[in-house]
Amino acid sequence: MLFDHELAWKDPAIYKEIYVNSIAAPEKFWEYHQNTLFPEGNYNASFNCLDRHAKITPHKNAIIWYGDEYCERREISYARLLEMTERIASELIRRGIRKGDSVTICMPMTPESIASMLACCRIGAIHNVVFSGFSANALNERIFRSASKIVLTVTAGSRGGKMIPSLHNVLAAIGDMDVDVLLVDHVDDFPMDDGALSVEHMKYDDPMFTLYTSGSTKEPKRIFHSCGGYQLYSAMTFKYVFDAKPEDIHFCTSDIGWITGHSYITYAPLFLGLTIVIFSGTPMHPDGGRYWQIIENERVSIFYSAPSAIRCLASLGEESVRNYDLSSLKVLGCVGEPMNEAAWKWLFTNVGKEKCPIMDTWWQTETGGIILAPLHNVKYQKPGFASMPFFGVAPGIENEELIIKNKNWPGLSSNFVRDDQIYHTGDKAMVDDDGDFKILGRIDDVVNICGHRLGTSEVESVVNALGEIEESAAIGVPHRIKGQALCIFATTTADLDQDQKESVAKEITTRIRQDIGAIAKPDKIVFIPELPKTRSGKIKRNILKIIGKKQNIDYDAADMQSIINISCIKEIEHAMTHAIKM
Ligand code: WTA
């Protein structure tokens, strides 16, 4: 018995044994799974996710789509998804796109957006999906930096009752750049190249896609994932963390604009031949019953969501779920930000009815797939803990930071060299006496708003570009639903009266929306006379974080001593009480 995860689910001792073996002999462990998952030795994701299933189960639903309103629903079989993908792939070829070319996709959550990703894979083009809620400026930067030759989009979409002018946004982003635009509203308009179009052969290390994410620098980071390692790791983690089987109905509420939407909406579930439910609306429109109604209608068995969505739905009370039949659920999951105990208990009791384990999964764009998860059935649950490492991954803690001591697991982005050096995650974590990990948030200058990573320096560079602003510091402060919210402290080039401050605050918000997108909108803006700084001129962010929280102002004495302009602290505390709420 090399690997029996069903036993591992039931018995922690078996998990431990397999885990220890996977660390002791990683080559053997991964090679075994590589051979099991890729019997044809073909690393083309479109082939693995579509052709293999379309041949055997052509009529099985690959996708069930729900739109912004209750009545909007479509079913797409594996055969149909293959055909849609082939048509888009033919059109891409016709427009001169070839293996290795970069293609940007900016679309709402629809079957067409998934077919677009798979069409790129089919011809070996490297897709670069940009979240459709990003502003034209943010999109422009990502098209330009990725050197995309073409952008795939649709005319428009709708989300939470609001129209998303996708095409308009894309055209504004492109401006006078020499970039083609392909509208994929009606894929049947694209003629099929009878048989002329074959699946591009992809090697294990060929690049598969890129995705931009925030770090502590001003510019978003471009993360590369390659075909073999990424598919192997995402499919395996999906199978073993969620106990996924082909008969499962999987509903992941993320968006293809994020890594979760790549790994656990698209690639892993389709690789394993499941039916996925995708939803292009929001959990609260037109009411808070959307997720539960979808689960009931489709008999969803795996439900993977985000803590902020759960907190938002929990605020509606237990009666908001009581009347739905959620008995089809077998496992729940959450990702993106720390899951607090209250939200965990609400989900466990009211949605899972105390019979579904909650997989609190910790991972990152860079890791391609899940690194930490409880990995056991309902008997071994610890609220608020992402718990234990996936097979083959060796996490640890160094100066309160979560680190990964090996880099030889296949999911890791190809930006990193697979050597013996430590991988630094940028997250703060602790480990308890049982060896279970608990994630506490970021240690670097990245905030996490509703599970979306945002570099504070990206925000600051937008704010600082305003003529009225001298300097600024964007800080993450705790928020009841969103996890964190942005609070901006800014100094101005001239004294402003209250009306002027309010108009500058509005201008800051508008610019942030334009340059980044609505997800980066600040909650509070505080005008202050000076930013607290060290002798070497560094902004003392941790002091601002304490002031931003507003309760229990409790400074560290050593920290305070390192500030050269200490007198500004009282003024900032005072200014905080007059913060402008946006
Ligand atoms: C945070 C999302 C606590 C963390 C897959 C990480 C989490 C960042 C969890 C990555 C979790 C993700 N508990 N925090 N279960 N999962 N995070 O790249 O700070 O969008 O570094 O990938 O989200 O965000 P990214």
Image (cartoon, rainbow, N blue to C red):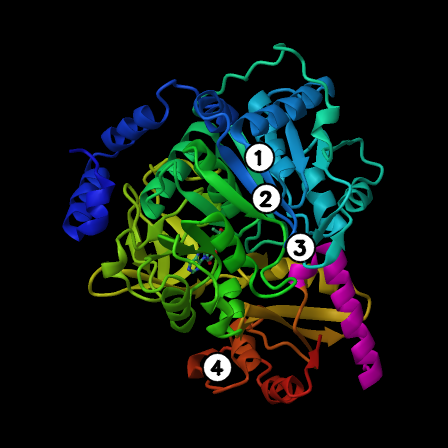
- How crowded pointer 1 is (Cα within 10 Å; few <14, some 14-19, many 20+) is rated as some
Residue type at tag 4:
Gln
| Residue 138 shown left or right of residue 565 in the figure | right
The answer to whether the residue labelled 1 contacts the one labelled 3, judged by CB atoms less than 8 Å apart, is no
- Per the rendering, the mark at residue 65 is 2
Q: Give the magenta part as a residue range.
A: 493-520
The answer to whether residue 192 is above or below residue 61 is above
Residue type at tag 2:
Trp
Task: Give the percent coordinates (x, y) of residue 472.
Answer: 67, 69
- How crowded pointer 3 is (Cα within 10 Å; few <14, some 14-19, many 20+) is rated as some
Magenta stretch: helix, strand or loop mostly:
helix
Measured Cα–Cα span from mark 3 to mark 2: 11 Å
Measured Cα–Cα span from mark 1 to mark 4: 63 Å
Measured Cα–Cα span from mark 1 to mark 3: 18 Å
Q: Which residue is mark 3?
A: 69
- How crowded pointer 2 is (Cα within 10 Å; few <14, some 14-19, many 20+) is rated as some
Q: Earlier in the sequence, mark 2 or mark 4?
A: 2
| Residue 577 shown left or right of residue 323 in the figure | right
Whether residue 580 is in magenta: the answer is: no
Which of label 1 and label 4 is nearer to you? 1
Q: Which residue is mark 1?
A: 76
Q: Earlier in the sequence, mark 1 or mark 2?
A: 2
Q: Earlier in the sequence, mark 1 or mark 4?
A: 1
Measured Cα–Cα span from mark 4 to mark 3: 57 Å
- Per the rendering, the mark at residue 561 is 4
Q: Earlier in the sequence, mark 4 or mark 3?
A: 3
